[in-house]
Image (cartoon, rainbow, N blue to C red):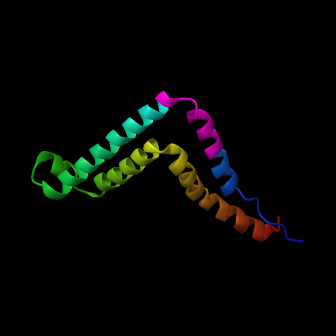
Amino acid sequence: MILAAPQIQQPLKDGTTKALTSLLSGNSTLTTVLQVGGGLVVVATVICLIARKWWPQFKIGQIMQGLGAFVGCIIGLVLGIICISPTTFLPWLVFIIAFIPQVILNIVGAIFGA
């Protein structure tokens, strides 16, 4: 008899949502600080991307050239969006990241029948 592999994606997403809701529900100061900080991170990242595109001859434009700087800008945008609305985006991100271990569990479960 072949049993299905344990499902970890949805429980991780639900647990993250529950933890964030309990942490942020009664703490409006923390929520405000996260939103302002996230907004500042997004603005700084957009300014860096603008400098990279339209002012490549200046020092900031030269610093922002290359793949590493672009990846850093993408990470900054994601971090800013998560800080602005953590109860919406962080559980979704956890769900996406848990996809890889879930695939591995499914493969191992199919091989060993557990």
| Residue found at the very far left of the displayed protein | 57
User: Horizontally, is 33 left or right of 56 in the view?
Assistant: right
Q: Quadrant of residue 97?
A: bottom right
User: Horizontally, is 8 left or right of 40 in the view?
Assistant: right
User: Horizontally, is 23 left or right of 66 in the view?
Assistant: right
Residue 65 image point, x, y percent: 22, 55
User: Horizontally, is 14 left or right of 78 in the view?
Assistant: right
Q: Give the residue at x 77% y 70%.
A: 111
Magenta stretch, main secondary structure, is helix
Q: Quadrant of residue 53?
A: bottom left
Q: Quadrant of residue 108?
A: bottom right
Q: Give the residue at x 44% y 36%.
A: 34
Residue 37 image point, x, y percent: 38, 36
Q: Give the residue at x 42% y 48%.
A: 81
Q: Give the residue at x 62% y 45%.
A: 17
Query: Is-magenta flag for residue 21?
Result: yes
Locate the C terminus by quadrant.
bottom right
Magenta-highlighted residues: 17-29
